[in-house]
Image (cartoon, rainbow, N blue to C red):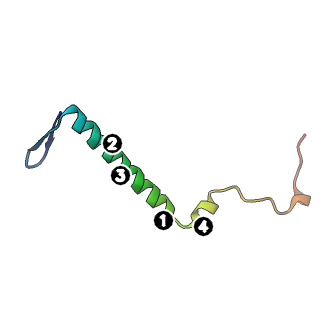
Amino acid sequence: MVITLTPDNCVLTLTAQQARVLSTQIIQAVQRIEVKTSLAQPRQAMRRNQIPPMRNMENALLVK
């Protein structure tokens, strides 16, 4: 596998095994970043996305 990096046209030549290892490492690094980013978000943001509980049930309409 040959990867050409521009603008300097640097060439990286990898065997099939090296390409597999590199792609696996890139995928794992991206997943780690996604997990860290999601853990860094405040808990309030997670709660805002949830459905709020119904508070005044006596005024709710029930449909059969």
Instruction: Give the SS element for disc 2.
Output: helix
Q: Earlier in the sequence, mark 4 or mark 2?
A: 2
**Mark 2 — residue?**
24
Residue at 35%, 52% in the rendered image: 29
Classify mark 3: residues with Cα within 10 Å, few (<14), some (14-19) or many (20+).
Answer: few
Where is residue 23 drawn, in percent x and y?
29, 41
What percent of the width, then of the height, locates residue 28? Answer: 37, 48
Residue picked out by circle 1: 40
Nearer to us: label 4 or label 2: 2
Q: Residues within 10 Å of mark 2 (few under 14, many from 20)?
A: few
**Spatial distance from mark 4 to mark 2, Cα to Cα?**
34 Å
Q: For the residue carrying disc 4, how many other residues have a C-alpha within 10 Å: few (<14), some (14-19), or many (20+)?
A: few
Element marked by disc 3: helix
Q: Nearer the viewer, mark 4 or mark 3?
A: 3
Position of 56 relative to 15 (above/below): below
Q: Are marks 1 and 3 in contact (CB under 8 Å)?
A: no
Answer whether labels 3 and 2 touch (C-beta < 8 Å): no
Three-letter amino acid code at the position of disc 2:
Thr
What residue lies at 43% left-to-right and 54% top-to-bottom? 34
Q: Identify which residue is drawn at 41% across, 50% down.
A: 31
Work out whether mark 4 precedes mark 3 in sequence or the reverse, and give the earlier one: 3
Residue, disc 3: 29
Disc 1 secondary structure class: helix
Q: Which quadrant holds residue 19? A: top left
Gap in angstroms between the C-alphas marked 1 and 3:
16 Å
Q: Is residue 41 left or right of residue 28?
A: right
CA gap, disc 1 and disc 2? 24 Å
Q: Nearer the viewer, mark 1 or mark 2?
A: 2
According to the picture, the residue beneath numbered tag 4 turns out to be 44
Q: Is 7 situated above or below 57?
A: above
